[in-house]
Image: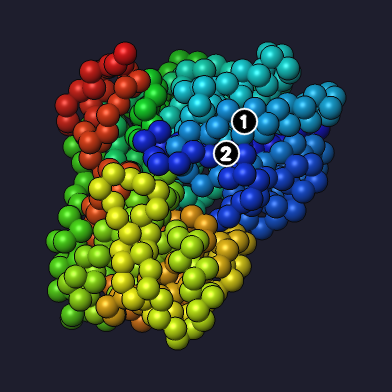
């Protein structure tokens, strides 16, 4: 069979400081740059991404693949209309040029918001359907943080989401998407069911390494093995997306419509019963640093602090310095924090050279109200090119291109600086600038959960710290204007009021 494959991923935090323009997709960074045609195969070689898993699986079954385009940008505010039109345009153009195909697979995120469309994926799928008609099997893999809309379900034949957060199963999810494609290519049809849960889940408590998420995700395999059921997904949603359909969902597929509906109902009910457990606990930056110093004094392994509210993996710019300032203020011993996104500081460090002192204001260049760069005399400890390959379970195989990097030191605290935004979720990102994280007392990371894949195994303890940033753990701080009414903004919390005009 001939299967077209492509991808277009963006996780949109509509409250974040900067948008994703075409350049953000074209240049890559932590993930491959925009690729088209055969370059898609090169970009996907050996990488933990859904498209890579789908390609490997389809090839091993002897199918012919037609590469379209694959693009992703670091999470941020809206995808610009220009970027959306150009990338969607080239996917559709190549799909059209491919002539008759037997199936289409798309590697999408599920939480893309563009300047004009609240539901970026729904809009892309609408255009795809207009082109290919209602009968071509269209299978889509989604991020665990997808805000799955009714349009996405209606316009595709099957949606399948990751089951781990940190997302160590991205490639595996692509392989599972192929399994559904194979069912459809065999001429079998799948009934669909979607359920929307009535409460938003904070990112940090949706981690599948902790309860209640762990048991819920673990249960999916058993639930979808019931007769007549083919696939079940639980997407936790992406809360900082101010759209009508924001929130967690369940989608189910199966050859028996009644069994499929029942499986969706039962999974939704099981999630609802765990609502209180999704509330989670966090500490202020001040308390988190004090706690880490205290624990670190008698531990042999580092205390890992998650600077979640500026997580570049959730739309933060990775340039707030609240947690850094707190580490310096409390004279945290053997502490390192990263990665601060500040191309200018990296450039100045490279110009000055290792061992030099530079007088700079670090970070906070995105103009967030109430944020100021942290001024001081920083020592340049180590320089890096920003080019290296990751080795941890989440970014496995990713060929990083983070531009000039530097390890600076202020008041005894080390700071990793990069020229591109990237979530600190792999130990290589620190080793590249001369830091063995295992040797530090405190390791502060700009990440919410993905860091756990590589850092939890070396951590004495993981503490979620709430330094000020654009990705608040507490959704009550977000001014939703488009979210539908009747959704609890936090687990067991107050209801959303509905759209404001
Ligand atoms: Zn995600």
Residue in front for this viewpoint, 384 or 376: 376
Q: CA distance from mark 1 to mark 2?
A: 7 Å
Give residue 395's position: percent from left, percent from top: 53, 58
Q: From the viewer's perspective, is residue 92 above or below residue 295? A: above
Q: In the current view of this chain or complex, which residue is farthest to the front?
A: 359
Q: Quarter of the image holding residue 384?
A: bottom right
Q: Please tell me the numbered disc located at residue 21.
A: 2
In the image, taking residue 124 as reference, residue 259 lies left or right, namely left
**Colouring method of the image:** rainbow
Residue 475 visible in the displayed image = yes
Instruction: Name the mark on residue 82.
Output: 1
Q: Tell which of 122 and 329 is nearer to you.
A: 329
**Going by the image, does 16 lie left or right of 231?**
left
Q: Does label 1 point to a residue whose CB lies under 8 Å from ligand 1?
A: no
The structure residue drawn at horizontal position 40% and vertical position 81%, both measured from the top left corner, is 357
| Residue lying at 16% horizontally and 61% vertically, measured from the top left | 286
Residue 298 in the figure: left or right of residue 225: left
Is residue 118 or residue 281 the one in the foreground? 118
- Evaluate if marks 1 and 2 touch, with contact meaning CB atoms under 8 Å apart: yes
Q: Residue at x 55, y 16 (%)?
A: 154
- Residue 89's x, y, as percent? 70, 27
């Amino acid at each position: 069979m001939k299967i077209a494959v492509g991808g277009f991923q963006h996780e949109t935090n509509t409250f974040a400081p900067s948008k994703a323009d075409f350049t953000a997709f074209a240049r890559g960074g932590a993930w491959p740059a925009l690729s088209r045609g055969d370059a898609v195969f090169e970009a996907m070689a050996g990488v933990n991404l859904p498209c890579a898993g789908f390609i490997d699986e389809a090839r091993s079954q002897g199918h012919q693949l037609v590469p379209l385009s694959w693009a992703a940008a670091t999470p941020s505010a809206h995808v610009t209309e220009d970027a959306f039109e150009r990338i969607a345009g080239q996917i559709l153009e190549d799909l059209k040029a491919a002539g008759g195909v037997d199936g289409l697979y798309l590697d999408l995120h599920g939480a893309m918001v563009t300047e004009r469309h609240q539901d970026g994926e729904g809009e892309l799928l609408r255009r795809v359907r207009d082109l290919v008609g209602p009968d071509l099997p269209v299978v889509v893999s989604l991020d665990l943080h997808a805000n799955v809309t009714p349009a996405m379900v209606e316009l595709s034949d099957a949606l399948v989401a990751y089951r781990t957060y940190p997302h160590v199963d991205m490639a595996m999810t692509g392989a599972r998407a192929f399994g559904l494609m194979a069912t459809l290519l065999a001429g079998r049809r799948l009934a669909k069911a979607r359920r929307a849960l009535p409460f938003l889940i904070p990112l940090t408590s949706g981690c599948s390494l902790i309860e209640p998420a762990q048991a819920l995700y673990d249960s999916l395999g058993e639930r979808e093995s019931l007769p007549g059921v083919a696939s079940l997904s639980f997407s936790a949603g992406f809360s900082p997306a101010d759209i009508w359909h924001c929130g967690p969902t369940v989608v189910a597929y199966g050859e028996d419509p009644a069994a499929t509906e029942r499986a969706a109902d039962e999974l939704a009910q099981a999630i609802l019963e765990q609502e209180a457990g999704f509330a989670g606990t966090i500490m202020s930056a001040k308390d988190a640093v004090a706690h880490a110093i205290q624990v670190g004094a008698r531990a042999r392994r580092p205390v890992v602090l998650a600077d979640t509210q500026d997580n570049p993996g959730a739309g933060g710019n990775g340039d707030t310095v609240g947690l850094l300032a707190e580490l310096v203020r409390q004279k945290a011993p053997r502490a390192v924090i990263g990665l601060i996104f500040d191309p200018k500081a990296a450039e100045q460090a490279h110009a000055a050279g290792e061992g030099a002192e530079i007088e700079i204001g670090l970070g906070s260049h995105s103009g967030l109200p109430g944020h100021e760069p942290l001024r001081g005399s920083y020592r340049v400890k180590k320089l890096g090119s920003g080019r290296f390959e990751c080795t941890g379970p989440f970014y496995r195989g990713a060929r990083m291109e983070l531009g000039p990097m530097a390890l600076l030191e202020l008041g005894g605290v080390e700071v990793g600086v990069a020229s591109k935004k990237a979530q600190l979720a792999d130990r290589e990102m620190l080793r590249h600038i001369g830091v063995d994280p295992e040797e530090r007392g405190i390791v502060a990371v700009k990440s919410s959960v993905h860091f756990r894949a590589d850092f939890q195994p070396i951590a004495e303890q993981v503490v979620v710290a709430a330094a000020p940033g654009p990705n608040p753990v507490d959704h009550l701080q977000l001014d939703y204007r488009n979210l539908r009414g009747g959704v609890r903004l936090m687990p067991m919390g107050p209801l959303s009021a509905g759209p404001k005009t």
